[in-house]
Image: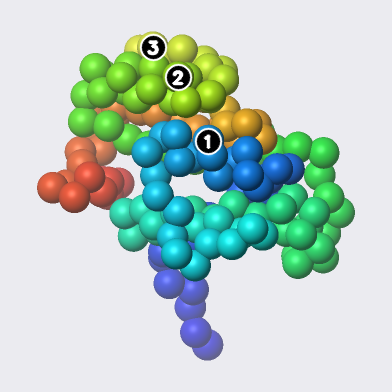
Amino acid sequence: MTALEPRISVVTLGVDDMQRARAFYERLGWRAAASSSDDVTFFNMAGVVLGLYGRKALADDARVAVSAGPSTNASLAHNCESEDRVDAIMAFAEAAGAKIVKPAEKAFWGGYSGYFSDPDGHLWEIAHNPFFPLDKDGRITAP
């Protein structure tokens, strides 16, 4: 029996308008990979690829019903080295077209975080977690 290795290679978000979604992430300063096309966009991240794919095409590929929008069952998170960096990223994301869902604030768990949503409603948490330090490459490991 082969076990599933504990890693994620690609996170794919279903989007309603590929050009709009791609433009939003490019305004965040991300660069689409050369393998992107009119139907799919890839962004190389620190060890993971973020994919944007049409919501209907994604549902068809998985053989599930198309959902009307994103689910609140999951969020993507970007951890920062400081509270000031969280504030700066939240402001930058808003200027790029993100909707601030929850302004950054002290969190009950001892950190500092806020949420924004992209144009398709996918939730992004921007957080500083003093209990999960970042390594020299900005990667996090749960202690």
C-alpha distance separating marks 3 and 2 = 19 Å
Residue, far left: 136
Q: Which mark is residue 105?
A: 3
Q: Position of residue 67 (x, y in %)?
A: 81, 44
Q: Residue at x 53, y 17 (%)?
A: 100
Query: Quick one: 28 or 129, which is closer to the camera?
Result: 28
Element at label 3? strand
* Alpha carbon distance from label 1 to label 2: 10 Å
The answer to whether any part of residue 69 appears in the image is: yes
**Above or below for 6 versus 65:** below
User: Which amino acid, mark 3?
Assistant: Glu
At mark 2, the secondary structure is: helix
The residue indicated by pointer 2 is: 95
Q: Percent position (x, y) of residue 130?
A: 23, 28
User: Which three-letter amino acid code belongs to the residue tagged 2?
Assistant: Ala
User: SS of the residue at dot 1?
Assistant: helix
- Give the label on residue 116, or none: none
Task: Indicate which label's residue lies in the foreground, 3 or 2.
Answer: 2
Look at discs 1 and 3 and give the one toward the viewer. 1
Near-viewer residue (69 or 36): 36
Residue beneath the point at 56% across and 20% down: 99
Name the residue beneath numbered marker 1: 24
Question: Foreground residue, 15 or 69?
Answer: 15
